[in-house]
Image (tube, rainbow, N blue to C red):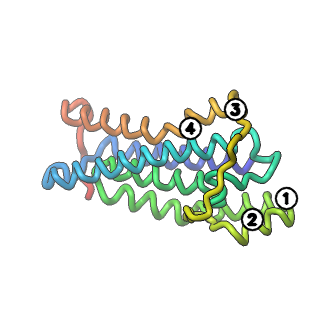
């Protein structure tokens, strides 16, 4: 229930941003192409890291989310690694718009919305796993990974049918950058007019 609501809110926010980007252009692209290209490169790198990170998380969590407390792999360095990588990916997509305003909007939205989501999900985990989760919460940081805590098993059982579904959601950052590039091309071809420019 909470996860479905979170997904709907995220999708709604993404559509609003996309609608704004459809009719706007980057000031940097027009006045400082070097910075425009730099923003895009940084965005593509962050989106790539986010996609790989999302796949790594999905490998461990797919099919096990409510069955057992996952504390290995990415979940050994952060209690919410999927949100961390999603944050990187969202900022990456924002930078790929070749603006500063869009990643700032995304940052503010994340800071306002996601702490409540994390708190709600962790309350549910505490109900399900009790003391085990309390011990885990005391040791592992909430969001920002601590790489020195990384522990991974030699063998891990994966549920391929469920993992396969998660692959597509992990790659949406890359797809979104492709959409941004298509919009930019449509602007250049004058198919879609630029009504205003943003920093």
Q: Specify which label sits upstream in the sequence, 3 or 2.
A: 2
Q: Position of residue 103 (x, y in %)?
A: 38, 57
In-front residue for pair 170/154: 154
Callout 2 secondary element: helix
Real-space Cα separation, disc 4 to disc 1, in angstroms: 27 Å
Please give the name of the residue rendered at 50% of the width and 60% of the height, measured from the top-left corner. Answer: 109
Callout 1 secondary element: helix
Residue 194: image quadrant is top left
Q: Label 4: few (<14), some or many (≥20) within 10 Å?
A: few
Whether residue 192 is visible here, answered yes or no, is yes
Q: Position of residue 56 (x, y in %)?
A: 58, 44
Q: 103 left or right of 23?
A: right
Nearer the camera: disc 4 or disc 2: 2
Q: 6 left or right of 100?
A: right
Real-space Cα separation, disc 3 to disc 1, in angstroms: 22 Å
Give the residue pinned by disc 4. Answer: 169
Give the residue pinned by disc 2. Answer: 136
Real-space Cα separation, disc 4 to disc 3, in angstroms: 12 Å
């Amino acid at each position: 229930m909470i996860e479905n609501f979170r997904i709907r809110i995220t999708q709604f926010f993404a559509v609003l941003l996309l609608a704004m980007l459809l009719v706007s252009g980057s000031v940097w692209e027009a006045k400082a192409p070097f910075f425009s290209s730099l923003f895009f490169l940084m965005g593509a790198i962050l989106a790539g890291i986010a996609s790989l990170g999302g796949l790594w998380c999905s490998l461990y969590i797919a099919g096990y989310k409510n069955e057992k407390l996952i504390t290995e792999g990415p979940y050994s360095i952060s209690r919410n690694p999927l949100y961390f990588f999603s944050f990187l990916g969202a900022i990456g997509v924002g930078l790929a718009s070749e603006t500063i305003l869009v990643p700032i909007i995304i940052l503010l939205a994340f800071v306002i919305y996601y702490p409540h989501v994390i708190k709600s999900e962790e309350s549910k985990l505490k109900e399900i796993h009790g003391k085990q989760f309390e011990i885990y919460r005391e040791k592992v940081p909430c969001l920002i990974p601590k790489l020195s805590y990384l522990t991974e098993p030699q063998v891990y059982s994966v549920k391929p049918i469920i993992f396969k579904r998660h692959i597509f959601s992990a790659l949406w950052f890359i797809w979104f950058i492709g959409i941004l590039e298509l919009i930019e091309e449509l602007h250049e071809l004058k198919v879609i007019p630029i009504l205003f420019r943003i920093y």
